[in-house]
Amino acid sequence: PQNRVVNLAAVEKVVELGQGLKAQAWTFNGTVPGPIIEVCEGDTVRVVMKNEGALAHGIDSHAFRINHEKFGPVEAGKTMAFEKKLDTPGVYMYHCAAGPVTDQHIKMGMYGVMIVYPRKSKLRPARELAVAQGGVYGEPDGEGMISPSGERMDENRPFIVLYNGKAAHDPVKVKAGEWIRVYFVHVGPGSSAFHVIGTILDQAYESGNPRNVARGVQTYNVAAGSGGMFEFTLPERGGYLLVDHNLLSQVPNGLVIPFIAE
């Protein structure tokens, strides 16, 4: 076990989404989603967040068993910190903690993936990627700029839903039969029906915890605010697609990650 420090900054900025779209966003470290946080079971993790925005922001990680008041928020220009030993492996959502307006801050883009790797059980070598699914709540103007809509946020009605904050993804090239592992977080709303068109999930881990395993699964639901770890192979050469089977209507908007097995 180690002592680890995670440094984050709350930054309010315009982000590029792809397909000619951009959005006004609130972010961690300037990106949506925020940076991937990687630690191990048993580590003592200190999270430090500097608020470089104009509004009050905080930070909540679902990996922590801790008094929620330590998640903030803090006013603009202030820095906050908390630490704890993490005892449960998994794939966790982290997000802004802003009291009664937390939901709005998450929907503005303040979320990310935190992976707590298991210490006692080893994961087999694999091609790995982390994916966060979240919505964008507003409609674009004539120049492709999306301004936030409070009405859409209140109604849980995103204009588009994206993987990793992008409306377009380059194909992930792998070898046929190669073991693939996806660390996945669903920001919400609703549940995400994780599915790879063209194969079956060899192993699906509830909350990304290796102790919670289901085998031979076609589709796996991940609740809003939760995560999962999924392992699979692509059995033969050709194309495959990671999708939310509950939101296939969003595939043209970019809610799809293509794989090419060579």
Image: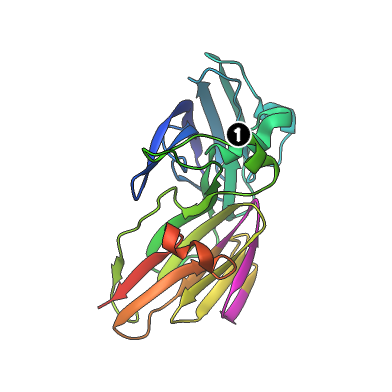
Mark 1 lies on residue: 105
Q: Residue at x 47, y 66 (%)?
A: 123
**Viewer can see residue 178:** no
Q: Is residue 111 left or right of residue 179?
A: right
Q: For numbered disc 1, what is the local secondary structure? A: helix
Tell me the amino acid under the disc marked 1.
His
Query: Residue 258's spot in the image, x, y percent?
Result: 36, 68
Quarter of the image where the C terminus is located: bottom left
Residue 145 on the magenta span: no
Query: Residue 235's spot in the image, x, y percent?
Result: 37, 85
Q: Which residues are magenta?
A: 214-228
Q: Residue at x 45, y 41 (%)?
A: 140
Which of the two residues, 33 or 2, is positioned nearer the viewer here? 33
**Viewer can see residue 109:** yes
Looking at the image, is 87 positioned above or below residue 75? below
Residue 218 on the magenta span: yes
